[in-house]
Each structure stands twice: as C-alpha cells, then as structure tokens.
Amino acid sequence: MTATMMSVELIKADSLTVDSLELGDFISYNDEIVEVIFIESDSTGDNYDVEVVNDFGEKEVIQFAFNEEVDWYVYLD
C-alpha cells in the first residue's frame, strides 16, 4: 500500500480585530503564519496577550491593543 501525502494550503481569508480571534486560528506575524494557542485580555479589555506557536514549535507571547487587526488564514480544501 502506498502512502499519499496531501498538500494543504493556507490562504488569507480576512483581517480580524484581536478580540475576534479564537484558539486554533492561524494569523500572520513576523512574516510567517502562526497558530493561536492562548488569548488573555487585561482587566480593562484594552490589551490582549496572544500566545502563538510556529511550525518549529517555538512559542511567543504578543501583546496587541484591542483595535489592532491581524491577517487571518484558513485552509484551502
């Protein structure tokens, strides 16, 4: 039996404000596409800490203002 590798492509679907993000979303950051793994807002709701992971498993926490927009990516079937 032969193994078949499927190539999956991510495409930019929209630009979202940070408060619209959900866990598992893919966003563009520092010229690469990363996955959102944690979201937390401060007590005022003005700032969001978003933890992301890249393809190499490297994690980073990014701080966004509530009104900032990020490019949102989805898989193309």
Image: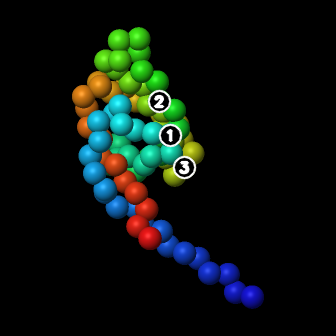
Question: Is residue 46 placed above or below 2 in the rendered structure?
Answer: above
Which image quarter is the N terminus in? bottom right
Asked if the residue at tag 1 contacts the one at tag 2, i.e. Cβ–Cβ closer than 8 Å, the answer is: yes
> What residue is shown at x 54% (from left), y 75% (from top)?
6
Whether residue 45 appears in this view of the structure is yes
Mark before the other along the chain sequence, 1 or 3? 1
Residue 15 left/right relative to 8: left
Q: Amino acid at mark 2?
A: Ile
Front one among 7 and 39? 39
Q: Amino acid at mark 3?
A: Phe
| Residue 31 locus on image (x, y percent) | 33, 48
User: In the orientation shown, which residue stands out farthest toward the top?
Assistant: 43
| Residue 37 locus on image (x, y percent) | 53, 38
How far, Cα to Cα, is label 3 from label 2?
20 Å
> What residue is shown at x 46% (from left), y 24% (from top)?
40
Q: Which residue is mark 1?
A: 23
Residue 22 left/right relative to 12: right
Q: Which residue is mark 3?
A: 56
